[in-house]
Image (cartoon, grey):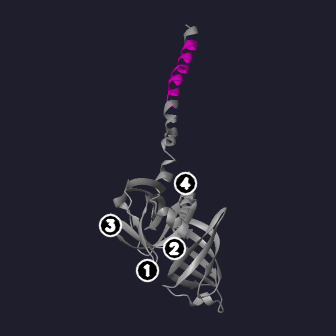
Amino acid sequence: MSDQPSAKPTEPTQTPAEPAKPAEPVAEPAKPAKRPAPGKPEEARRIERLPGVHLDVNIGGPLTLHFPTLGKKYEAKVVGYEPFSFLIVLGRLPQDVLAQAAGGISLLAQHAARGMVFGFRTQILNRITNPASLLFLAFPESLERIVLRHDARVSVNLPGTLNGKYGEQKVMVQDLTLTGCQFTAKADLKTPLRAALVGDRLVLNCEMGCSLPIVVPIVLRRVVAEKGLLHIGAQFVDMTPETLEQLQNYVGGLLEFLDH
């Protein structure tokens, strides 16, 4: 009889062993690892291959002509087009380049419009020299479009200079998008930039760390003076395809880093 009481206390030692099973649900919080980190950078910047009908033409915008067989490139400006037929660009090419282009060699063109870079193969169909040096380019059958989210905005601290009718002024760029930026500048009563107005057109030269600086025309959209500083919002205009692609790479790279 006295042995039985000592046996009963051993039974509870078996029942606590069962609650050890709830250790399985503890593993569930690891599920957030499912979140695909690489997904966001792809959304931030992507390359699309499309039919030529998707080409957006920015009249007055720059267009870069690459001659792969010659290892040369030249800047031109789009002045007109006939949809799905040809583009008209204003640009001077050396005679030796024109002579080879007349043979129907293929060239690569890059054109920036609405915050996107379009790249495509084309040929020079015709050219005239009077009243201006105009080239007629074949409308592309297909193209590549590099797209970055238009709402992609990154906070930065990049030194730069502002040039134009107010002279040269040091600025600090504080955020960047594909279409514009915001920056500040020190200003006292003698600073010419204090007279800046919305609508003024200037040129921004911005350092981009290890990459090349960007030099881009801007139009001022907001000018606020406060406590010895000018806070200015600006819109990028007439960017070359190279500058826009450089900006896409820089902003896209920062977004990829931040998303990770």
Q: Amino acid at mark 4?
A: Glu
Q: Which mark is residue 83?
A: 3
Q: CA distance from mark 3 to mark 2?
A: 23 Å
Q: Amino acid at mark 3?
A: Pro
The residue where tag 1 is placed is: 130
Q: Is residue 165 above or below residue 259?
A: below
The earlier-in-sequence mark between 4 and 3 is 3
10 drawn magenta: yes
Element marked by disc 2: loop
Element marked by disc 4: helix
Rendered residue at 67%/61% (across/down)? 210
Q: Amino acid at mark 1?
A: Asn
Q: Nearer the viewer, mark 4 or mark 1?
A: 1
Q: Is residue 67 above or below residue 161?
A: above
Q: Nearer the viewer, mark 3 or mark 1?
A: 1
Tell me the magenta residue range.
5-22
